Image (cartoon, rainbow, N blue to C red):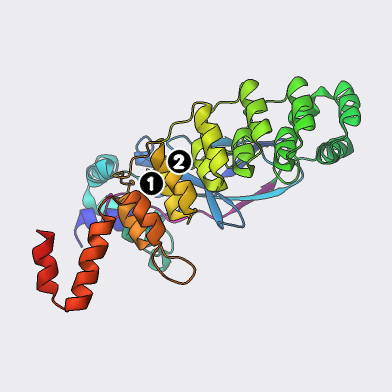
Amino acid sequence: MDFDKFMRRMFRYSKPEAPAVADRSKSSVSLVWRSPSAFAFLEHRLLYQLERREKIPPWELIYSGGRTSKTIDNLPPRHPHKFRLRAVLRASDVAALSSAALTHHGDVDTAITNITLLVEDAQCADEDSEVNHKDRGWLMSQWSEETWTSTESDGVSAVCFCMAVRCGYIKQLQAMLEERPELIDIVSSNGLSPLATAVRKGDVNTVRFLLQAGADVGRPLAAGQTPLHLAVLAGHLPIIDLLLDNGADLQSRDTNGLRAEHYAADSGRVQVVRHVLARGGNINVRDHNGWTPLFRAICQGASTELVAELVARGSDVAVRDRAGLALLDAARLLRDHNGRRRESLLRVVDASYPREAALAHFARLTGKISNLHALRK
């Protein structure tokens, strides 16, 4: 095995120490970590991925970058949390891995000896990270051991305040805020702020009261969703207007890069799409996957009426996502609950559909594929 291959192999087998808890509060946890000991000489070149345990999906990426600390905000109080970490080496730095090791250790034999001693259980490591990232040429270490911690308790009054929000008891909310103003943006055990709770319920009166009391209109949930995103997804038009009129940012994104326009498509309601666009939405805005609202609508099996509305309002039907998948190809792959193609949807997004359908029908009748190829020319 040559030295370059050895270094790449050992990096994939290495494992950073579990992140340590530096601080915690009622709604946040601060973590710190160090680079894998065998590759400490790469300290300024390493990136890190930090994940938190969830139910669906099992792990959620909450940080990716070069820092060695992270504060995770907007967590529910009195709630356990589990985290894990791995190191990442970009493709541009992989080529310099061997030379950096030689500079640090002096020679090949010393480097091999020292690094082998520091990398434990090499034979047990899997190579999934290499398989999944060959196209980018990145290297990824093994996941660290898991770190368990919890947020601190917030007291009975916080529980009562959250309960009053769910019940819409505005007089009680006002009295509690006079005693403890900080409750206005407290995070409940389900991860929602009072404003987000009222928005999800569709309680416009409680939403209005909380905004007047100083609630943060743009405070995101752990997944980056804002109250505006929740209102759009639920189709609460009066609340959408109330939030926007009180400073909600139509351009805010969640952790997946989704904006209000994407949530409007996800809502499945044509009137919500119209409303968001009328308030200044961008019909062709993209998320982190390169999906526009139309792309999401097609991939999630939206109604033909909703797709037609998006197309009529100028959605780009020639768009491709980050992976190179064309919107038209996604539409052609879509099937209904009986396993058949969504013909009505194809008519909306594919300008060549009638001709393609006629050609395919002709080929079936004649049984001559050569005729089909000739007609396509």
Question: Mark 1 is on which residue type?
Answer: Val
Circle on res. 27: none
Q: Residue 273 location, x and y as percent? A: 52, 38
> Circle 2 sits on which residue?
64
Give 96 or 210, whichever is nearer the viewer: 210
Q: Is residue 153 left or right of residue 1?
A: right
- Say what secondary structure mark 1 lies in: strand
Q: In this view, does 131 lie to the left or right of 61?
A: left
Q: Magenta includes 145? A: yes
Residue at x-position 58% and y-position 57%? 56
* Classed neighbour count for the residue bearing mark 2: other residues with Cα under 10 Å, few (<14), some (14–19), many (≥20): some
> Circle 1 sits on which residue?
88
* Classed neighbour count for the residue bearing mark 1: other residues with Cα under 10 Å, few (<14), some (14–19), many (≥20): many
Q: Give the range drawn in magenta.
A: 133-149
Q: Are marks 1 and 2 in contact (CB under 8 Å)?
A: yes
Residue at x-position 57% and y-position 46%? 267
What's the distance in space between the residues labelled 1 and 2, CA to CA?
9 Å
Question: Mark 2 is on which residue type?
Answer: Ser
The image quarter containing residue 117 is bottom left
Residue at x-position 20% and y-position 71%? 362
Residue 259 visible in the current orientation: no
The image quarter containing residue 230 is top right
Quadrant of the snapshot with the C terminus: bottom left
Q: Is residue 37 left or right of residue 146?
A: left
Q: Residue 261 location, x and y as percent? A: 50, 37
Q: Magenta includes 270? A: no
Q: Residue 22 location, x and y as percent? A: 63, 37
